[in-house]
């Protein structure tokens, strides 16, 4: 994007002024370019974008300069900020097993491991 076109995309009031000169006063692209300092190609691209997005001129009164710029250049102007709900972090689960139960579980596991070892050693002999 060249510098003049970037100026046009960054200035919502200039966008509205260029469209008013084109549609209300029926000026040619070279005359609009001379009055605004925007290149003829950028003006042509703006008018083409306008015809792709909107059907006719004048726009209804519900469009402000900023809304018009957002509609014509959707990637450049972010949409209205959205409020995001904070995600609640899950609390780590707390196991409620007593220390006695845990100790019995460890002993049982060690006992079964011993059994497995003795059985496997018998198979090898």
Image (spheres, rainbow, N blue to C red):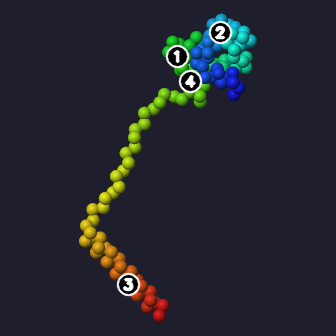
Q: Earlier in the sequence, mark 4 or mark 3?
A: 4
Q: Can residue 28 be seen in this view?
A: no
Q: Which of 92 and 28 is in front in this view?
A: 92
Task: Tell me whether circle 4 and circle 1 mark residues in contact (CB < 8 Å).
Answer: no
Residue 102 image position (x, y, % from top left): 29, 70
Alpha-carbon span between mark 4 and mark 1: 10 Å
Query: Could you classify mark 1 by the number of other residues whose Cα lies within 10 Å: few (under 14), some (14-19), or many (20 or more)?
Result: some
Residue 32 image position (x, y, % from top left): 69, 11
Q: Earlier in the sequence, mark 1 or mark 3?
A: 1
Mark 1: which secondary structure? Answer: loop
Residue mark closest to the camera, 2 vs 3: 2
Q: Which residue was labeled with disc 2?
A: 21
Mark 2: which secondary structure? Answer: helix
Q: Which residue was labeled with disc 4?
A: 70
Alpha-carbon span between mark 1 and mark 2: 17 Å
Q: Which residue was labeled with disc 1?
A: 64
Marking on residue 20: none
Alpha-carbon span between mark 4 and mark 3: 74 Å
Alpha-carbon span between mark 2 and mark 3: 93 Å
Alpha-carbon span between mark 2 and mark 4: 20 Å
Query: Could you classify mark 4 by the number of other residues whose Cα lies within 10 Å: few (under 14), some (14-19), or many (20 or more)?
Result: some
* Residue 70 in the image: above or below residue 116: above
Q: Which of marks 2 and 4 is nearer the N terminus?
A: 2
Q: Nearer the viewer, residue 104 or 51?
A: 104
Q: Which residue was labeled with disc 3?
A: 115
* Residue 118 in the image: above or below residue 57: below
Task: Tell me whether circle 2 and circle 3 mark residues in contact (CB < 8 Å).
Answer: no
């Amino acid at each position: 994007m060249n510098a003049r076109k970037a100026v046009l995309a960054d200035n919502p009031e200039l966008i509205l002024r260029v469209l008013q000169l084109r549609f209300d006063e029926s000026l040619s692209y070279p005359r609009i370019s001379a009055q605004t300092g925007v290149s003829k190609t950028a003006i042509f691209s703006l008018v083409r974008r306008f015809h792709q997005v909107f059907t006719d001129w004048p726009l209804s009164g519900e469009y402000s300069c900023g809304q018009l710029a957002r509609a014509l250049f959707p990637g450049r102007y972010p949409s209205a900020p959205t409020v995001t709900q904070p995600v609640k972090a899950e609390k780590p689960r707390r196991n409620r097993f007593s220390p006695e139960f845990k100790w019995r579980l460890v002993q049982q596991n060690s006992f079964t491991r011993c059994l497995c070892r003795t059985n496997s050693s018998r198979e090898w002999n």
